[in-house]
Image (cartoon, helix red, strand yellow):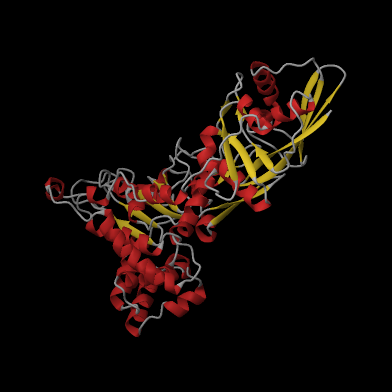
Amino acid sequence: MYAATHSASVFGIGALPVEIEVTVETGLPAFSIVGLPDSSVRESRERVVAALHHSGYAWDPRRITVNLAPADVRKEGSAFDLPIAIGILQALELMAPIDLTDCILLGELAFDGAIRPSRGILPVAMMAKRTGIKRIIVPAANADEGAVVDEVEVYGVTNLREAVMHLLGSAPLERHHLDINEVFRTESARHTIDMADVKGQLAVKRAMEIAAAGGHNMIMIGPPGAGKTMLAKRFATILPPLSLTEALETTTIHSVAGLLPPGQPLVTQRPFRAPHHTISDAALVGGGVGVVRPGEVTLAHHGVLFLDEVPEFQRNVLEVLRQPLEERRIRISRTRMTVDYPANVMLVCSMNPCPCGHYGSARRECKCSMQDVQRYMAKISGPLLDRIDLHVDVPSVHVEDLASSELGESSREIRVRVDAARRLQETRFVGRSHLFKNADMSSKEVESFCILDDESTSMLRIAMNALKLSARAYTRIIKVARTIADLQQSEEILAEHVKEAIQYRSLDRAGWGG
């Protein structure tokens, strides 16, 4: 006896269709799964058998073989439990035969037959839409996530028997609906933190506004307790809100990683990821043993990647950021597979100026030797610093600012100016990512949109010679100057814009970066 059902397997941040074939034969009792399953799929034998028995389905011992096709693609995850169970019921003739060619089944089974939530439902629903599959049956807890794709009928089930009754038509379920536009409108503007919480640091806030307006990377250098982490956590609140397309891409990534919070079918705010400095290079950019997973760079897609105390990170970990910062993508290559992950992130770093944190401070004496300072700063390579547009000094906060009851500008007020600059860039760069505009200008675009007058050119030439800047740093200064001009609604880049952009190369002025 033979039966076939259909499911899907997550690959990268997408999904591939999987056909599940079940054959039942006479012979010694056995239950085997073939088709390149990983350990979580092989363990489904025990879960499926227990769920079937506890749901009231019993059969004489048989030889059961399950094949997951195509057999040359590795299958992983527990979401194959439900389609395997349905296939077994049909092959054993405990359930009337049904044509399931237009239906995808997903769900992990508990021993009592309950269906537990699974990850990767959204990319599966998007794959179903792309391939013309009409309906998917998913765990009830994932129904909102699947219903984000309105073109596919989504049905949420709570247990195995409910799924069987729905498929047989004896107790059909209602299609699950979700008003994605309403969810997006009500959740996208909610922030629990605000830039107004930060006392003082007007110069740093100005630099963050420039970074947000142009999509530039930045690094903050200052003593402990100056507010670097507090500022970085509020950076996403001044960025433009996610577009619906960006929200779908971000949600897909978090769905694949299993990071969608319960009851939240859509990521509506820009991600903020702050990995610990002990992170490995594979955890940062993606990888893993056997199954490749997205790393922190991809989880921060369309948002902010914050590296606190960046010199404490292993140097080989920092160096793997070079490619994604340039190309906005990361390619993970393994013997059996190659996976491309998106990496449209804004990099924000913070660091102390020396091991004790008080080098150059007028308030506390630095106890580090010059060799200690140079050794500390050399942990960040010159090529990586070249890819960071704004180097911002963060001084200690004056007690007068701390004691003041006056609130600074709110994130909303700053975001108004950022959005105005972005609208200028929208007309300039048609089809460019909503998050990255000036920072991603090509050489030809720099020549077209960043024309400098004689005074600006002379000033930049002097800075290049004095600071011994690279060609990349030269171009990035011009891009930052273009952003400053955009914030002032100026079509021309003036000398004052270039002068301010040069000031944001403080690490180059100090000769740091090993």
Q: Is residue 333 left or right of residue 500?
A: right
Task: Residue at the far right: name it.
Answer: 27
- Residue 502, visible in the rendered structure: no
Residue 113, x across and y down, in percent: 61, 22
Q: Is residue 460 left or right of residue 131?
A: left
User: In the picture, which quadrant includes the C terminus?
Assistant: bottom left
Q: Is residue 509 left or right of residue 275?
A: left
Q: Is residue 448 above or below residue 118?
A: below
Residue 137, x across and y down, in percent: 62, 37
Residue 187, x across and y down, in percent: 38, 47
Q: Is residue 51 above or below residue 469?
A: above
Q: Nearer the viewer, residue 430 or 373?
A: 430
Q: Is residue 441 left or right of residue 392?
A: right
Q: Is residue 503 above or below residue 310?
A: below
| Image quadrant assignment for residue 124 | top right
Numbered disc total = 0
Q: Please name the residue shown 51% across and 52% down the image.
A: 321
Q: Please name the residue shown 87% across and 18% down the image.
A: 27
- Residue 103, visible in the rendered structure: yes
Task: Residue at the far front: name it.
Answer: 170
Q: Nearer the viewer, residue 467 or 433?
A: 433
Residue 309, x across and y down, in percent: 37, 45
Q: Please name the residue shown 56% across and 40% down the image.
A: 175
User: In the picture, which quadrant includes the N terminus?
Assistant: top right
Q: Nearer the viewer, residue 293 or 45?
A: 45
Q: Please name the residue shown 12% across and 46% down the image.
A: 403
Task: Residue at the far bottom: name it.
Answer: 454
Q: Is residue 479 above or below residue 106?
A: below
